[in-house]
């Protein structure tokens, strides 16, 4: 699986003082009509049940200069839950999930379907709100390392 290069995203969920998020590379476009995304979420991840209960999540596509945030939300600094949102600049979407200011794109999604597997769920979401920064290059993950696109 380490040979599948992927964009690095932060998937966030919650409302108010109950916010959770994680670093994800298992994110894909499902359809443009209706606009929909699929995210792989570990069943034991603290965001999993919050997404399923609230029915909302946000996919924040990271730029190559946001590697530190990828590490924070992957748990590499020891921060958990709400503590992770002390890093970066965040604003709440109208639906609740936090959106990272300066991300290449923010996709606020309403949960429409879930497919459960032994250790993970595939979460399908209809894109309700989209913001695009339009600048920068994506942060990529390949062979257990971060990288970016060259000019």
Image (spheres, rainbow, N blue to C red):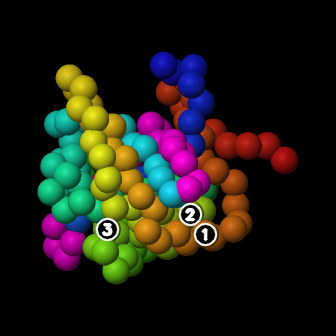
Mark drawn on residue 97: 3
Q: Quadrant of residue 40?
A: top left
Whichever of callouts 3 and 1 sits on the residue coming sooner in the sequence is 3
Q: What element carries label 2?
A: strand
> Which badge, 1 or 2, is on the more N-terminal residue?
2
Instruction: Compare residues 93 and 55 and report the one nearer the observer.
Output: 55
What residue is rendered at 61% in x and 69% in y?
132
Residue 44 appears in the rendering:
yes
- Asked whether 24 falls inside the magenta stretch, the response is yes
CB under 8 Å between callouts 1 and 2? Answer: yes
Secondary structure of the residue carrying tag 1 is strand
Q: Residues within 10 Å of mark 3 (few under 14, many from 20)?
A: many
The magenta segment: 15-33
Find disc 2 in the rendering and name its residue.
105
Residue at 23% from the left image edge and 32% from the top image edge: 116
Q: Is mark 3 on a helix, strand or loop?
A: loop
Q: Which residue is pictured at 69% across the width and 54% down the height?
A: 137
Where residue 68 sits in the image (x, y, percent)? 47, 53
Asked if residue 89 is positioned above or below residue 37 in the image, the reply reads below
Residue 119 shown left or right of residue 68 in the figure? left
Which residue is denoted by mark 1 in the rendering? Answer: 132
């Amino acid at each position: 699986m380490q040979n599948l290069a992927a964009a690095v995203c932060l998937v966030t969920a919650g409302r108010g003082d109950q916010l959770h998020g994680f670093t994800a590379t298992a994110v894909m476009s499902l359809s443009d009509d209706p606009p929909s995304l699929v995210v792989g979420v570990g069943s034991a991840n603290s965001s999993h049940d919050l997404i399923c209960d609230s029915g909302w999540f946000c996919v924040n596509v990271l730029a190559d200069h946001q590697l530190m945030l990828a590490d924070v939300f992957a748990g590499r600094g020891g921060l958990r839950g709400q503590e992770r949102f002390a890093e970066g600049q965040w604003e709440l979407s109208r639906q609740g999930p936090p959106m990272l200011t300066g991300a290449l794109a923010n996709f606020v999604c309403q949960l429409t379907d879930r497919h459960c597997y032994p250790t993970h769920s595939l979460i399908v979401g209809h894109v309700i709100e989209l913001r695009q920064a339009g600048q920068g290059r994506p942060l990529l993950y390949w062979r257990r390392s971060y990288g970016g696109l060259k000019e």
